[in-house]
Amino acid sequence: METKINDSLSVAERRELLLLAAELRDVLENRLDDKELKCLSSTLRDSLRKPRQAHDDKGLAEAIMTLKTANAFAGMVDPDHNILIAILLHPLVKQKLMSADEVETIWGTDIAGLHRGLEEVARFSTRNSATNQENFRGLIISLAHDIRVIIIMIVRSLVLMRSINLHPDDAWVRNVAFEANCLYAQLAHRLGLYKIKGELEDLSLKYTNREIYTQIAHKLNATKRSRDAYIKAFIDPVKNELEKAGLKFEIKGRTKSISSIWNKMRKQKVDLPGIYDLFAIRVILDSEPAKEKSDCWLAYSILADMYTANPARMRDWISIPKSNGYESLHATVMGPDNKWVEVQFRTRRMDLVAEKGLAAHWRYKGGKADGTDQWMNNIRDILESADAGPMQLMKNIQMDPFGKEVFAFTPKGDLFRLSGGATVLDFAFHIHSNVGAKCTGAIVNGQLKKLNYKIQNGDTVEIITAANQTPKQEWLNIVTSSKARNKIKQSLNEEKQRLADLGKEALLRRAKNRKVELEESVVMKLIKKMGYKFALDFYADLGTEKVDPGRFLNSYISWLSPQSEAEHVSAEEFEIRRNDDDEKSQNDVLVIGEKSINGLSYRFAKCCNPIYGDDVFGFISSDGMVKIHKNSCPNATHIKERYPYRVIRADWSGKTGQMLPATLRVVGNDDIGIVTNITSIISHEQGVALRNISIDSHDGIFQGYLVIGVSDNRQLTTLVKKIKTVRGVKDVVRI
């Protein structure tokens, strides 16, 4: 490819550009026919004759960066000529040296599509940080359209990181390093591009903490000779034994990346001499496809006969590969001088995948690669989280934040892959969002487990659901997957909107009854004065009766007319007249189920969860709300002794028509099927619902807490009697 260098480039830059062009030509000559090669050479040559900006605003030569990106992609990922051409042509279109229509006309729709993907990405964060709140979502959406665009951006980030050492703009360098580490390194890890990921992390450490990077690098260089000697002493006898077994292989040792060593030093709180696995031995076998697994295990067995293996550090990614295609058998053995040594066994094919990730066996079809659909769906699930900021999104993009994956089975034997640390609730949402939303627990390996139980490798998990179960706010602290988190947030938002609609309706109805016309501007001022940032939260609290619409209307009227007779009076200022006569005035009693007394609203106390038929009393809280307590409530004595002036009589007018919660403590023998029998009784009881269940087991005795929805205490008493009849149940108590 003959080129005419723009005069604005320095002599050194011209020389570098020519060398890069020659290197790339060798690649393209094997990928393009003569006509295509001639057309590309002509296009690039013509572009260099036209006026163009040789350097960007940071002083980097764009033509050099482009050729470096193309060469790096060809060498480290895949020499696909469509991608290489798209990389080369994109800067020309960006500088208006050729049009996008020309690209499509000359090179076809696939290359034009790649260009459009790169153009979309170029709109975000070329000058501003990619992790800027405003830019980040657009960037990720653009990346998710075509997986090849993701790879180009990763390689481009690597080339940029290689080119900015000792750049004068230190703040910009740090920003680029942050993006590379938090975004592009994680994307590279997700795609199995471990070599690129390691270099990005090393360079990021170099630019953000140069002192630490230099110290570790110097110490590694100082110990290189002794380390190489140890590796040779370890490899030689292993080599001999593998050759005796008739295996064809290559064996080599490599020092781990500086960033990996630094992370180990911080995690283990030790200096460099305290890190035992500074290097790893890799055995790469030449095996036939049918004998790949058996050859790897044979090589491992030979090693295990020579050195003592550490079973706790055994990693089998041959039987079940990682989601990004990675296959390898990792073992740690006690080598000479009582030093732990990590050894990796893999075939040539496995090594190619490990070095170049999924790109090693891609078949490009519309921008998608075989085996990547699930990953792309995960990216799109992440994007559904509308309230997630850049840092949360980047955290969600990481494949396995705990450095591992777990595999679990359904009772039918279906295998599911989850990230390390995944819980029962994650498993449920992984099956289906509706299953997750209705999940109340799971039976794991025959034992009942709570929602927060962490799945272990090989677990058999049967999800338990309930029709009346709905996602809770606290679930967000249980789940680890982005899919589960997003679905929970979506459900909570929908529920909040529903409650807000109910609350708004209640307020409007109350205002209509009192013949008060509500002005939106005054309502909003009052809402903000009450401390609400969003009107939705206020109306939702109205819907849950946390805020009394009557009291709010009083405040509204007072706001419009400060001298109004309807001026608000707090609940603590009410005086309840007490009459010792047998005939009590109806006004002295809060009748539950009818309209509230003196404009007061009530709700049921959560400390004792009263239900219809219980002996109850009312307590006027500081916010003006009357809380209904059982007379047998643990807090009743304290309330009546300390705040007698805030206690009012309360009685039931009849069934409220609502299902109220009651908590039962069940104690019994930890027999197989006992929990299933209990839940079965509850499910068959008309007008009763199981809202929550938690079980603890110890020494053959289980203690469970059941939250039951019932309409009255008579119904609850009947249910308690039936549960006591279950074989193995020793005691059932309402708490």
Image: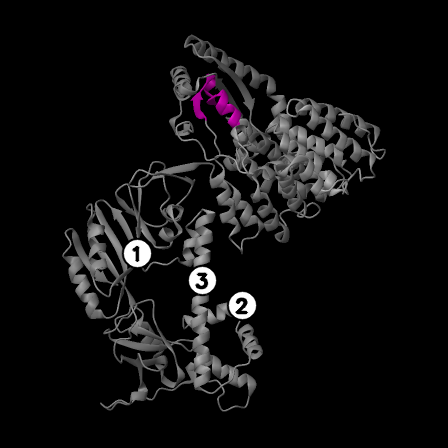
Please identify the residue farthest to the right as the structure is shown: 7
Q: Which residues are magenta?
A: 328-354
Q: Which mark is in front, 1 or 2?
A: 1
Query: Which mark, residue 494?
Result: 3
Query: Is tag 2's residue or tag 3's residue first in the polypeptide sequence?
Result: 3
Q: Marks 1 and 3, how far apart in space?
A: 19 Å
Disc 2 residue type (three-letter): Phe
Q: CB under 8 Å between callouts 2 and 3?
A: no
Is 36 on the left-hand or right-hand side of 238? right
Q: Secondary structure at mark 3?
A: helix
- The mark tally for this picture is 3
> Which quadrant holds the C terminus?
bottom left
- Asked if disc 1 and disc 2 are in contact, CB closer than 8 Å, the reply is no
Indicate the position of residue 700 as horizontal and vertical percent values. 21, 45
Q: Which residue is mark 1?
A: 466
Q: Could you tell me how far apart the alpha carbons at marks 1 and 2 are, in whole angstroms?
A: 33 Å
| Front residue (pair 563, 23) | 23
Q: Which dot marks residue 534?
A: 2
